[in-house]
Amino acid sequence: MKTVGIGFLLLIATSWTLTAASNANEEAAQDSEPEQAFRVAVARFSHETCTFCPGEEPGIEDWYRHGEPRTGDDTLRLSGYVRGFANKAREYNDIELIGLTSPVGVWGGTSRSWNQEEVFEYFVGNMIAELEEAMPVDGVFLSVHGAMAVRNIERPEAEMARRFREVVGPDVPIVATFDLHGNEDAQFLEYADGSFVTKRFPHYDSYRQGERAARYLRNMMRGEYKPAIAVRRPPILTATVLQWTGQSPLMDVYERARRWEDREPGAYVNVFLGFPWADVPTVGVCVQVMTNDDQGLADRIADDMAKFIWRVREEWAHGEFPQPEEAVRATREAIEAGETPVVLADYWDRPGDATWTLRELIDQDVDRVLYAALSAEPSLDSIWEEDLQPGDAFDMEVGGYTGEQAGAPVRIDGTLIWRGSRWGYERVAAIEHGNGSVIILVPAYQQITTPGTLRFGPIDPDEFDVFVLKTRVHFRRGFDETGYAPTIHIVDAPGDWFGTIRLDALDYQSIDIEDFYPFGDPEPGY
C-alpha cells in the first residue's frame, strides 16, 4: 500500500475548506437583500376573441362577472405565464415586482365577440395610471394572448406595448408572453423588446415561457442582452383544430425552433400559428426571432423557420372529420369492441350550445354518455327559479340557442342529480337521463381538458363509455396524451359555419382569404 503524503492531505483539506467557504458565501449572497433591486411592473390583459361568434360584444361589466380585477401580489398569480415569470424573478433576489391591476377574464371566454373599445381604454388606462405612479421602473412584463380583438384598435397588444413605452421611455425593456394562437406581426416588437410564445398545444409550457421571459428581462436590465429582432409571416391560415403540436409536421416545426435555441446561445424562436376567428389584419402565421445583438443570425433563423413552415404547409393545413351521424355510428362500433371510453369532440362549436351530436347519440340509443358540457343558461335560470333540488324531475328543452348552426333544441327528460358552482360559474347543473347518461349544463362555453375536472358530486368519469366535449385540441392533455381514451373522433359540423375548418365561408373584412394558403395560391416572398 502506498503512503499518502501529509502535504497532499493538507492540499485536499485546504481545497475542501475554500470550496465550502465559496459555497457558503454564494448562498449568503443569494439569501441577502441586494443593495438595489430592479423594479419591474407586471400586468395581464388576455383574450382570444372570436369576432364571428354571435351575441353581444362584451363590455366592462362582462370582465367583472368572474370577479374583481386582481392587483398587487394577487396579479402575480393570475395565470401560468405570470406565475412562471414571478417565481423565476423572485429566485434572482434582485427584482421587485409591482403588480398592476389586471382583469381576471371575460365572461364566456373564447366564445365572446369583439371587445368594446371602452373595455380596452378602461383596463389599459388604469394600468398606465398605476404605472405612472410607480415610476421609475427598470422593466415591464406583460402577459397577453395575441388574438385579442377590440373595436377601432387594430393591434391591441401592440397598442398596449406602445402606451407602456410612452411612460417608461426608450431604454426600459418590455417583454411579454403570448399564446401560440396569437395573430401578430412586427409591430408589437417595435415597442417591446422580446416575446415568448408557447411551443406546445395543448399549452403545457405557459409557466416555462414566463420563466424564460424573466431570465431574458433580467439579462436586458443588467446590460447583458441587446436584442436583434427578425419577423416573418408565411401566408398560411388554418383552423385551430389542425394546430395540434402532438403530431407532425407541427411537432417538427417547434422542434426545429428548439434546436435553433439550443444551437445558438441567446437565440429565442417564436412561432404563432394564428387564430382565424378574429377578423383582424394580422391573422395567420408569424415567426419572431430574437438574438443577442446579431441581426444576421436573427434573419437567418427567421428565414429558415418561415421556409420550413412553408415547405410542410400541405401536411397540416387540411383535415377531414366525420359528421355527427358517422361519428356516433363509429362510437357504437368502438363500444362493441371494448375500445372505450370514446371521446367525441365537437371541435367547431365555439358557443357550446350545438345539439347535433347530442341528437345523434339519443337517436342511435347510445348509453352511458357524459356530455360535458352544454351551454344552457335559460335551463339553468329555470332550475334556480323553480328551486329544483337533486332528486327532482327535469323535463326541458336544452341547447340550440344561437341559430341554425346550433341545431334544434333537444328535450331531456331525466333527474337533476347535482347543482352548484363549478369552473368559476355560480350555477352549473348535472342531469341524469336515458340509460346511465349525464348531461352537464353550464351558463357559457366550457372546455373540458381532463377527466379529473369531471369528478365532482355523484359524477365519476370512469363510469362512462362516451364523453362529448366542446373542444378542439386542449382535451388531448387529459384524454389522449395520457392514454385515458383509446378512441377519439373529432366531429365536424353539418354546415359551413364559423368554427369549422372551412374558413372561406366566413365574411372576412380585414383580409382577402385568397391571400392565404390553402384558400388561394399566394407567394411566400422568401
Image (tube, grey):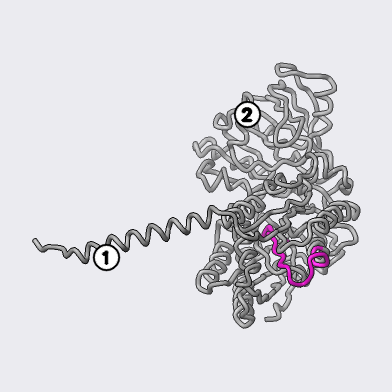
Q: Residue at x 55, y 32 (%)?
A: 462
Q: Residue at x 59, y 73 (%)?
A: 308
In magenta segment, residue 218: no
Is 87 left, or right, of 175 in this rendering?
A: left
Q: Residue at x 72, y 22 (%)?
A: 416
**Of residues 431 and 169, which is closer to you in this image?**
169
Rendering coords of residue 395 (x, y %): 78, 23
In the picture of the structure, the residue carrying the numbered disc 1 is 11
**For residue 273, what is the image quadrant?**
bottom right
Residue range highlighted in magenta:
164-182
Q: Secondary structure at mark 2?
A: loop
In magenta segment, residue 172: yes
> How far apart are the two marked residues, 2 and 1, measured between alpha carbons?
64 Å
In the picture of the structure, the residue carrying the numbered disc 2 is 456
Q: Check the picture and name the quadrant holding the N terminus.
A: bottom left
Q: Secondary structure at mark 1?
A: helix
Residue lying farthest bottom?
Answer: 296
Rendering coords of residue 218 (x, y %): 62, 64
**Of residues 337 and 370, which is closer to you in this image?**
370
Q: Check the picture and name the quadrant holding the C terminus.
A: bottom right
**For residue 170, what is the image quadrant?**
bottom right
Rendering coords of residue 328 (x, y %): 64, 40
The kind of residue on which mark 2 rests is Phe
**Of residues 110 and 375, which is closer to you in this image?**
110
Q: Earlier in the sequence, mark 2 or mark 1?
A: 1
Reply above or below: 343 against 95.
above
Q: Is residue 323 visible?
A: no
The kind of residue on which mark 1 rests is Leu
Q: Residue at x 83, y 25 (%)?
A: 382
**For residue 12, what is the image quadrant?**
bottom left
